Image: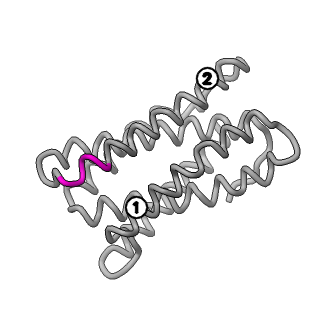
Amino acid sequence: MSEIQSFAQILRVNHAGELGAISVYTGQILISRLLHPACVPALSDMLAHERKHFRTFDEILRARTLRPCHALALWAIGGWVLGVFTAILGQRAVWTCTAAIESTVNAHLAHQVDFLRSSDQQVLAAVQSIQSDEAMHEEYARERGGNPAGPYRLLWRSITAATGCAIWLSTRL
């Protein structure tokens, strides 16, 4: 877990992470429309949540005249590639991707809440406002086979490592 140093850092990494999530779901929906149409409604709902979360952090960044993370393009491109790749691999890979990302994000959000609890109430409220959606996404994905079992163990580990690396990188850019 990255060491939190400022509210600006939290806002930047969450803003970037939400853009990455939007890109993952966009890529998954693109392929799932052809290969896994039953996944599309749930993925579309999750995408709508992530767009709302992105707007929340974008509005706070703008109101505080803070710059976004310099790695936004990396989040967008990497997320889209991951979304397309996992959708090509199949429905279980889609849900493993979602659960792996959300498990990492949920741990990161809990760490942020601990840091923010006695300080910036606006940023705390923004982080807490997204926690239930992110937990719901993880639970939904796990119920559909998204877990680190069997052949999906390597996929899970790769995605959690990449997510953790992206979070770490975004706290520095």
Q: Secondary structure at mark 2?
A: helix
Highlighted range, magenta? 38-42
Q: Residue at x 45, y 64 (%)?
A: 139
Residue ID for mark 1: 140
Decide which of tag 1 and tag 2 comes sooner along the chain: 2
Percent of width and height locating residue 138: 46, 60
Percent of width and height locating residue 57: 61, 31
Q: Residue at x 51, y 49 (%)?
A: 133
Residue positioned most to the right: 118
The majority secondary structure of the magenta stretch comes to helix
Let me know if residue 123 is in the magenta part: no
Q: Nearer the viewer, mark 1 or mark 2?
A: 1
User: Separation of disc 1 and disc 2 at Cα?
Assistant: 28 Å
Percent of width and height locating residue 4: 76, 48
| Left or right relative to 53: residue 117 | right
Q: Amino acid at mark 2?
A: Glu
Q: Name the one closer to the observer, 132 or 110.
A: 132
Q: How many marks?
A: 2
Q: Residue at x 21, y 62 (%)?
A: 90
The answer to whether 95 is drawn above or below residue 40 in the figure is: below
Tell me the quarter of the image containing the N terminus: bottom right
Residue ID for mark 2: 59
Residue positioned most to the left: 34
